[in-house]
Image (spheres, rainbow, N blue to C red):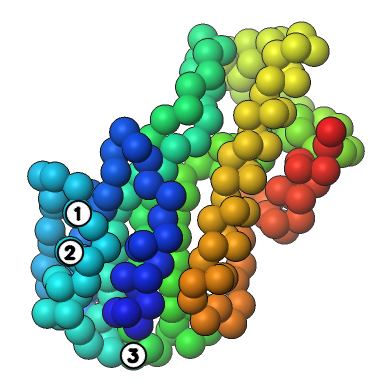
Amino acid sequence: MGAHFVRLLEKVPYSPERPGIASLTIRAVDPAEPLLAEFRFTSPAEAEDVAGLVGEYLSADSAYEAEAFWNLWTRSSEGKWARGPEGMEIFCFGPEYDEGAPAQEGHFRIRLGFEHLFTGHAGLLGIAGPRGAGEPQHPAEAEFLRAMQDPAKFREYQERTQENVRELFDWTRRIEAALPVERYQLWSEGEDNFEARLDEILAVR
């Protein structure tokens, strides 16, 4: 698992502005136990640097967590778009970690941040059109929905979100090519079928 973890880190599409691995955390037995080790790198660490540290703590009941950054499009509250670093957390779980839970839950997990970076806000995107988000609950949400009534701004929102989805799918394909992946799942708290939702958003031309 340690070798696969390093191979996965080699395939991360690191942000040019924040390249490399920012930190590495190592746990043993289960999430309730104290950390075995924690490393925060003052300069970007490469996958081979992490390989040496993982090798020192290699165990079937250990878990490894790396923090890194990749570039995605984000929209500010003022409506300006920028492509820049967004954080991610990459986990590797040994087969005996947490009483063998990885056998069912997976040996790797990647947290990519807020799902709206890929699905957009308020159910506006997709071939079915707006999915009925209801009345805005916050003035900022109301302002966003007003801005999206402008066809040019809506089109830009759709295109930037689609670019983020393509970045995710491209990385997924690179992972499948680099590692012996048996199965994977794209999941979010806000979508019953996150992958199908992303396919729907990409289908719009």
Foreground of the two, 188 or 21: 21
Q: Which residue is mark 1?
A: 45
Foreground of the two, 97 or 180: 180
Quadrant (top left/top right/bottom left/bottom right) for the N terminus: bottom left
Cα separation between marks 1 and 2: 6 Å
How far across and down, in percent of the image, does residue 25 sit? 20, 63
Q: Which residue is mark 2?
A: 49
- Pointer 3 local density, CA inside 10 Å: few below 14, some 14–19, many at least 20: some
| Left or right: residue 39 compared with residue 114 | left
When the figure is inspected, residue 81 is found, relative to residue 59, above or below; the finding is: above
Q: Earlier in the sequence, mark 2 or mark 3?
A: 2
Badge 2 marks a residue whose secondary structure is: helix
> Which disc is residue 79 wearing?
none
Q: Please report contact status of discs 1 and 2: CB closer than 8 Å, yes or no.
A: yes
Badge 3 marks a residue whose secondary structure is: loop
Badge 1 marks a residue whose secondary structure is: strand
When the figure is inspected, residue 184 is found, relative to residue 72, above or below; the finding is: below
- Residue located 53% across and 30% down the image: 73
The three-letter amino acid code for the residue at tag 2 is: Asp
The three-letter amino acid code for the residue at tag 1 is: Ala
The three-letter amino acid code for the residue at tag 3 is: Glu
In the rendered image, which quarter is residue 132 located in? top right
Q: Which residue is mark 3?
A: 96
- Residue located 44% across and 37% down the image: 71
Q: Residue reaching furthest right?
A: 128
Q: Earlier in the sequence, mark 3 or mark 1?
A: 1
How far across and down, in percent of the image, does residue 102 sit? 44, 82
